[in-house]
Amino acid sequence: MNENCPICNSPTNYNKPDGSRDAFLIDCFRCGNFSITGSAKAFCYKPFGSPLQIANVSGWIREHQKELFSDDLEKLMQFRTPNVAEKAIKLLKYLSKRYPIAGAEIMIDLGAADSLLTLIREDNFSIDLDDTSTENARKFLPLFSASWTQNSKELSFILYDYLYRGQKYLHFEENNKKLAKITPDGWVFLESLRTSNPESQTAFIAMSFAPELDYLFDDFIDKAILNSGYQPIRIDKHEHANRIDDEIIALIRQSKFVVADFTGQRGGVYFESGFALGLGLPVIWLCKRDDEDNLHFDTNHYNFIFWEKGKESQLQESLQRRIEAVITKGNYTVNA
């Protein structure tokens, strides 16, 4: 059974039920490979969101390639849209993975990409293995999801105005603006990303797993991060099959920033926040007010958000403001 993608309405190589459970396996030309539950698929009635929301959800799916539930879609519909620089980084990183050999020519035909979006919007695209438009769909539709862009005009700005003329991370042939290469400066910049994650949408949560603090994450920290447009990850709520210490290090490396609550003075929180600082990642510091005197002296110069029992809503508001000021607007210093 081949249907269009429930998220972006693009053609798929397959869109079929997974017989072992209530889910559908989808290989979308734009979003990539993912699975979606039946209830989540039903949530994607046409039209599914605005062009901006479709761009955000499609971009997130291409980056994560995971199973989608209804709750995921509801959260993603409210997701923060990456800024221009973040979109450009995402696209450059995608191109470097697809064309990993230095000097490789990259074919980019924005005219063909624009025609594809028009056909998809009008429900007039059909797959023909020998047809040029199908070949172009495989090549060019991923550019929209990789860059989280809505249309060819926005994609053109990212490619030509920002990456080519502005940052000079891409070079286009003078006589053929459809042929590009990643420049030496582009490769140097990509190498610099190995120690930071400006394109990441996730936040790692370091805190005590004491049952009496679960409500703090579930009702306040989690919501503050989601409302800021990021995806919170706490290791005890993250499914994995690896050693837990290896998984913690891997998740921190993949995160854009860390939120560390030192209530209870857990050694793991000190280690995880220190590891993040060593990677150059922003850390946002939290602690319960009546535990302030127990903080290690090495942390007393950081700008903590102190919270009190019964006033956790103030913590949520303060944390959201801190994330938006420090992470979203980029006002990060070592004392974040």
Image (tube, rainbow, N blue to C red):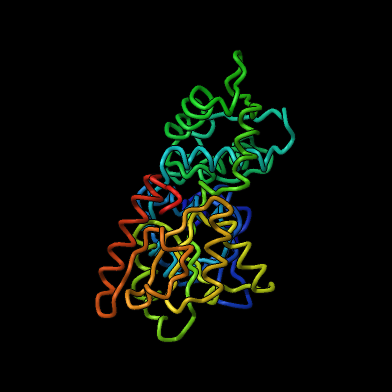
Left or right: 176 as drawn, with respect to 232: right
Say whether residue 62 is visible: yes
Left or right: 335 as drawn, with respect to 109: left
Q: Quarter-wise, where is residue 211 in the image?
A: bottom left
Point out the residue furthest to the front here: 297
Q: Quarter-wise, where is residue 132 in the image?
A: top right
Compared with 32, 175 (above or below) is: above
Say which of 155 and 136 sits in front.
155
Residue 133: where, in percent of width, then height?
Answer: 59, 36
**Residue at x-position 51% and y-position 71%:** 234
Quadrant (top left, top right, bottom left, bottom right) of the C terminus: bottom left
Compared with 277, 308 (above or below) is: below
**Residue at x-position 48% and y-position 60%:** 258
Residue 15: where, in percent of width, then height?
Answer: 58, 60
Say which of 157 and 260 sits in front.
260
Residue 3: where, in percent of width, then height?
Answer: 54, 57
Compared with 318, 190 (above or below) is: above
Residue 92: where, in percent of width, then height?
Answer: 58, 37
Point out the residue furthest to the top here: 175
**Residue at x-position 37% and y-position 45%:** 329
